[in-house]
Image (cartoon, rainbow, N blue to C red):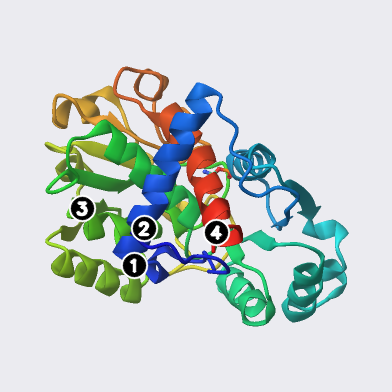
Amino acid sequence: MKTEFKGKHFITLQEWNKEELDTLLDVSFDLKRKYAMGIDTPYLLRKTMFLMFFEQSTRTRNSMEAGIAQLGGHANFLDTSTMQISHGESAKDTAIILSRYGHAIACRNCFWESGNKYLRGMAEHATVPIMSLQCDLYHPMQGIADLMTIKEKTETTRNLKVSIIWAYATSHKKPISVPLTQALLFPRYGMDVTLAYPEGYDLPDWAIAQAKENAEKNNGKFRITHNMEEAYKDADVVIPKNWGSWVNNQSTAVVDDLLESYRGWKCTEEMMDLASRDVMYMHALPADRGNEVVDSVIDGPHSIVYDEAENRLHTAKAVMALTMGGK
Ligand code: CP
């Protein structure tokens, strides 16, 4: 088990090796057990972390704020529209100054082709760990919570048939970071991963190449289909979720003709009937109910979305405890 995490950045799970991820999961389960038993976990007493948000959030903000409080520390919530960033202050200056005031900086910046660069810019100059709260490419906090959820619901992840499926939605043009993170992570745990999407909603070529390499190295599988029914067929886990056509079309418009032509990509009971008998339905949330998924599925017996959302708390606490505390 790895024990040296202090100061390690958390920008993509790809930069955490298997041993590090296994420790992170182990600590997450330990924190969850202690939470269930009401045992105090004052591992970050009087530590301060900064939470910078360029976009809205429910789960990420609150799992981090509740999490640091439960670890004995304090979070400063920073709406970046009220910071000098909005007048052009650089990532470098922001990172150096916040590093002098506290013990970690976490940030959500999902702007296409600049979010990840912004986090990397902070990481280059910060003297405390930088945590991604989601960028244009990755959502590591979501990915590790999803992995924890799958691990606690299954006997083994090896050969588990997991389908990451594009779904129709109109709420906003969503980042590709959730499916991209899952596509990279799940094959590392030996899962049999199918990525399904209609033409025009590709993930970047480098990410697909990396997902395939991860599968090869870890006895997992990774394949792509443009046939929605095929992705549901015999799946053990289905994750139907919308993402935007960012790779092919950088417009921020939410609804366009391409999107409208795929209204049929919805998770319905008919689709769930194609999957394995005990299939689990997952979604990072928020879900676009009625578009991505019908209520009877997300509220039905196969749905594990609330356990998945709860695990955001336990995994966020583990990330903070390891990277801000410890040796
Ligand atoms: N899944 C997720 O990141 O949710 P929020 O956007 O509410 O943080």
Q: Which mark is residue 21?
A: 2
Query: Helix, strand or loop at disc 1?
Result: loop
Q: Residues within 10 Å of mark 3 (few under 14, many from 20)?
A: many
In whole angstroms, how far apart are the C-alphas of marks 2 and 4?
A: 16 Å
Real-space Cα distance between discs 2 and 1?
6 Å
Apparent side of residue 215 relative to residue 197 in the rendered image (left or right)? left
| Circle 2: residue type | Leu
**What's the residue at 56%, 74% (across, down)?**
113
Q: Sequence-wise, which precedes: disc 1 or disc 4?
A: 1
Residue at the location (18% across, 40% down)? 229
Q: Upstream in the sequence, badge 4 or badge 3?
A: 3
Q: Nearer the viewer, mark 1 or mark 4?
A: 4
Q: Is residue 65 above or below residue 254?
A: above
Q: Which residue is mark 4?
A: 326
- Distance from disc 4 to disc 3, alpha carbons, whole Å, reads 34 Å
Is residue 156 toward the left or the right of residue 310 in the image?
left
Disc 4 crowd, CA 10 A, few/some/many (<14, 14-19, 20+): some
| Secondary structure at numbered mark 2 | helix
* Ligand 1 neighbours mark 2 (CB distance < 8 Å): no
As measured in the structure, the alpha-carbon distance from the residue carrying label 2 to the one carrying label 3 is 19 Å
Element at label 4: loop
Q: Nearer the viewer, residue 7 or 13?
A: 7
**Residue pointed to by mark 1:** 17
Please name the amino acid that badge 4 sits on.
Gly
Residue 7 visible in the shown view: yes
Q: Amino acid at mark 1?
A: Asn
Q: Are marks 2 and 1 in contact (CB under 8 Å)?
A: yes
